[in-house]
Image: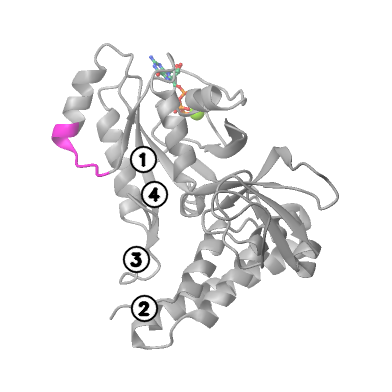
Amino acid sequence: MPANLTQQYHKAEQRYREASTPEEEFACLQEMLKEIPKHKGTDKLQADLKQKISRLKDEIAKAKSSPSRGSTKIPRQGAGRCVFIGAPNTGKSKLLSKLTRATPEIGDYPFTTRAVQPAMMPWEDVAVQIIDTPPITRDVFDPSLQNLVRGADLIALFLDLGNDDGAQELDDILKIFQNSKTRFGPETCIDENDIGVTYTKTILVANKIDDPDAADRQEFFDSEFEFPFERFIISAETGQGLDELRNAIYAAMNAIRVYTKLPTKKEPDMDKPFSLKQGSTVLDLAELIHKDIAANLKTARIWGTSVHPGTVVKGDHELQDRDVVEIQT
Ligand SMILES: Nc1nc2c(ncn2[C@@H]2O[C@H](COP(=O)(O)OP(=O)(O)OP(=O)(O)O)[C@@H](O)[C@H]2O)c(=O)[nH]1
Ligand SMILES: [Mg+2]
């Protein structure tokens, strides 16, 4: 029986994936439980949610009694989050060093990266958070990477075109995730018929195209494996294909930029836009700026493509990319 989940449920679920503290997760799960349609088709999902809530309650209580152990979650920053996933030596850290200002350790031996590392990738006047991760193999897999995958806006899955075993090593990783509830998909969604299963939008990053045998390896990969995700063929070494990849990463964030103007000032602040998800409203922007501003929001004036300059709108007005907003409290 389909679960027929409501819009509110999907919204709470989206916030749950993006939560950066256990407390936030707890609040979202409670909302999901409240919003879930109560019928036979959702029995298992309800039980699942209750179990997660009870587990989180314990986790929060434990963290409070020993604060030093606190949460290891990485706070979200910028327009969204892209997580690099791949086998050892596929060039994840090298690519991170090319797209961001981070200086991770890069080595021609496996398991160079030992811990997840976030960094910011500039894109025009905003930035996307990129997370480099330790490698995954058939035998070595840190299950906490599943949470990172579930909460990401985009997964960049690496194929090593510089290694004859690259295709097989990628397939091993696909199988690990395919056998779990956290999977790679062409788009981000939850599976209404297989409760608890989530798909995160994924692209294939085929790296080391500068290798003399790269084309043969790519042909072999295509003949042996089915891989339905968009593909970017790059060389982190020479920089080939990186502009296109950068644009695709930003596009996958489904983000808009909004500039703010103080009522007392003539000109807006065009230096530092706020990044919001497409479909965000004036109230969402106010919440991002400060909760007091959201609480006191009366109206806003908008300059942008969708309205006459200076149109007065309410909190539920949907913002467009490059809008200028003057919030009136
Ligand atoms: N020829 C070539 N070599 C590359 C390219 N990208 C990375 N490398 C090399 O591949 C090796 C592995 O690169 P890393 O970035 O450390 O790979 P990784 O995926 O982070 O490896 P782990 O941390 O073990 O998971 C290094 O010697 C890099 O210089 C590329 O585009 N072309
Ligand atoms: Mg690395």
Callout 2, which amino acid? Asn
* Element class at badge 4: strand
Disc 1 and disc 4 in contact, CB within 8 angstroms: yes
Callout 1, which amino acid? Ile
Whichever of callouts 3 and 1 sits on the residue coming sooner in the sequence is 3
The image shows residue 138, relative to residue 147, as above or below, that is above
Callout 3, which amino acid? Asp
Residue on which the image places disc 3: 191
Few, some or many residues within 10 Å of mark 3 (<14, 14–19, 20+): some
The image position of residue 179, as x and y in percent, is 31, 55
* Element class at badge 2: loop
* Element class at badge 3: loop
Disc 3 and disc 2 in contact, CB within 8 angstroms: no
Label 2 CB, ligand 1: below 8 Å?
Answer: no
Question: Farthest residue in the left direction?
Answer: 223
Mark number for residue 201? 4
Whichever of callouts 3 and 2 sits on the residue coming sooner in the sequence is 2
The image position of residue 21, as x and y in percent, is 66, 58
- Specify the quadrant of the image occupied by residue 105: top right
* Element class at badge 1: strand
